[in-house]
Amino acid sequence: MVACGEGPLVQDVTSFSKDTWYQDSVISVDVEVSDTQAVYRVTFQIRHSNSYPYSNLYLFREIRSDRQTEYQDTVDIRLANDRGAWNGSGVGALKTLELPYKQAGLRFPKPGIYRFRFQHGMRDEPLVGIRDFALMIEKEEEPTAE
């Protein structure tokens, strides 16, 4: 559950002109963290059109602090199932897929600014059919005793 009184810590949307994502167009979002005891729910959304030519999207992800790279990986996101039907929601030519950054929430080790970076890892240059990429970070609500 998410706290009712607080809005997201971050809600950032990057839109790609003409549904075209270039390899050197790294999405970079800075997040100022002061509460290192909190658990943060991090999700991202990918909105794509029917013109996207593949059933998957390789995505390079990284979290940097002012000291070092805190986390780095590559994920293979399944945009369509084995029969070719798009995953995600939406009517018509646009589909939106929302995914957790990690299954468990994130904690940040020290207060400061953390930079989330995303870059597509596909071979096409440019990659067509990707409309928007959104990142949302929310503080998870602490369980209350009743």
Image (tube, grey):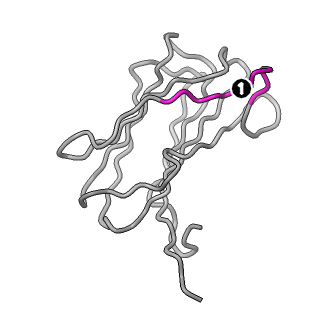
Residue beneath the point at 47% across and 56% down: 105
Give above or below for 130 relative to 127: below
Our reading of the magenta stretch's main secondary structure is loop
Residue beneath the point at 52% across and 10% down: 124
Outermost residue to the left: 67
Give the quarter of the image for residue 71.
Answer: top left
Give the magenta range. 75-86
Residue beneath the point at 79% across and 25% down: 85
Residue 45 is one of the magenta-drawn residues: no
Residue 27, x across and y down, in percent: 42, 34
**Which quarter of the rendered picture does the C terminus lie within?**
bottom right
**Which quarter of the rendered picture does the N terminus lie within?**
bottom right
Residue 25, x across and y down, in percent: 41, 25
Residue 76 is one of the magenta-drawn residues: yes
Horizontally, is 140 left or right of 92 in the view?
Answer: left
Give the quarter of the image for residue 18.
Answer: top right
Residue 78, x across and y down, in percent: 64, 28
Give above or below for 109 relative to 82: below
What residue did someone put label 1 on?
80
